[in-house]
C-alpha cells in the first residue's frame, strides 16, 4: 500500500471466532456493533 501511496486502516477485535454470531456462546455484542459500524461506514464512503 505504501508503494502505491494508498492508505489502509486495519481494525482488529480481541474476540473469538464468530464473535458476531448471536447463537455462539462467545458472542460479543459490543464488538459486533463496532464491526457493523465499520463495514457500514466503509460501504457508505466508497460505494455511495
Image (cartoon, rainbow, N blue to C red):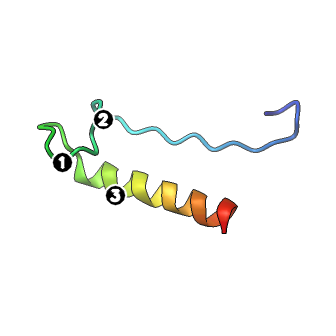
Mark toward the start of the polypeptide (2 vs 1): 2
* Residue at position x 55%, y 62% in the image: 41
Percent of width and height locating residue 16: 27, 31
Between the C-alphas of marks 3 and 1, the distance is 12 Å
In the image, which disc is placed on residue 38?
Answer: none
Q: Which callout, 3 or 1, points to the residue nearer the camera?
A: 1
Between the C-alphas of marks 2 and 1, the distance is 14 Å
Q: Do the residues labelled 2 and 3 touch (CB within 8 Å)?
A: no
Percent of width and height locating residue 18: 28, 35
Mark toward the start of the polypeptide (2 vs 3): 2
Element under disc 2: loop
Instruction: List the residue tagged with mark 1.
Output: 22
Mark toward the start of the polypeptide (3 vs 1): 1
- Give the left or right position of residue 1, taking residue 19 as reference: right
Closer-to-camera residue (21/5): 21
In the image, which disc is placed on residue 33?
Answer: 3
Amino acid at each position: 500500500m505504501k508503494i502505491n501511496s494508498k492508505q489502509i486502516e486495519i481494525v482488529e477485535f480481541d474476540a473469538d471466532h464468530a464473535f458476531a454470531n448471536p447463537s455462539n456462546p462467545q458472542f460479543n455484542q459490543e464488538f459486533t456493533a463496532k464491526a457493523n459500524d465499520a463495514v457500514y461506514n466503509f460501504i457508505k464512503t466508497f460505494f455511495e
